[in-house]
Image (tube, helix red, strand yellow):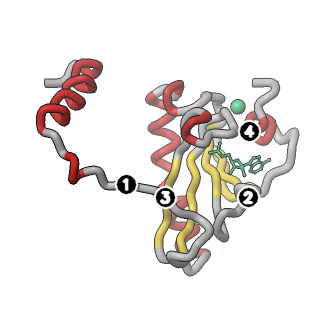
Amino acid sequence: MDDCIFCKIVRGEIPSEKVYEDDQVLAFLDLSQVTKGHTLVIPKKHARNVFDLPPETAAELFRRIPKIANALKTAFPLEGMNILNNNEEIASQTVFHCHIHLIPRYSKKDDFGLIWKDNSDTYDEEEFKKRAEAIREQLKYT
Ligand code: AMP
Ligand code: ZN
């Protein structure tokens, strides 16, 4: 895509600090460095986000992630890692070329956090089943 910033990075038209590259996947440091070593992994072929990602591209993208995550783990004294993928504006996507964030975690006081409310206290068996059924219907899974 002509005006896509990550496609421009793939084509070398704008600079990036690359840490991994092959024919299908590129990984480079995220400018924002939410935590030290924060890295983005992208398919070279443009896709807007996960809703638009061909399964083969997804497979090629994700199969590189353990290797890159382990490189970060060896390079830095991280205690853990959040692997994050934002899809569409409501979910905080700001660059519309699919990418996976690798965010090393060093301590609970890192500049990264997730609000993850546990609603299990309002568990409703019927509603739970209805939700699963709605998804199964789309996947035609029984
Ligand atoms: P998201 O909000 O999930 O779409 O993430 C987009 C990420 O791209 C942000 O964390 C930005 O810091 C990062 N970013 C934007 N432009 C660049 C760039 N030129 N080089 C590296 N990272 C970038
Ligand atoms: Zn792109």
Label number found at residue 32: 2
Q: Is mark 4 within 8 Å of ligand 2?
A: yes
Work out whether mark 2 precedes mark 1 in sequence or the reverse, and give the earlier one: 2
Q: Is mark 2 within 8 Å of ligand 1?
A: yes
Which label belongs to residue 6? 4
Q: Amino acid at mark 2?
A: Ser
Q: Earlier in the sequence, mark 4 or mark 3?
A: 4
Real-space CA distance between mark 2 and mark 4, rounded to the nearest whole angstrom: 15 Å
Q: Is the CB of mark 1 within 8 Å of ligand 1? A: no
CB-based contact (under 8 Å), mark 3 and mark 2: no
For discs 4 and 3, the disc positioned in front in the rendered view: 3
Q: Nearer the viewer, mark 2 or mark 1?
A: 1
Question: SS class of the residue under badge 1?
Answer: loop
Taking the view exactly as shown, the residue that stands out farthest to the front is 122
Q: Mark 2 or mark 4: which is in front?
A: 2
- Classify mark 1: residues with Cα within 10 Å, few (<14), some (14-19) or many (20+): few
Question: Disc 4 on helix, strand or loop?
Answer: helix
The quadrant where residue 23 appears: top right
- Give the mark, 2 or 4, whose residue is nearer the N terminus: 4
Instruction: Give amino acid for label 3.
Output: Leu
Image marks 4 and 3: residues in contact by CB distance under 8 Å:
no
Residue pictured at 31% horizontal, 55% vertical: 118
Residue 117 numbered mark, or none: 1
Q: Name the amino acid type tagged 1.
A: Lys
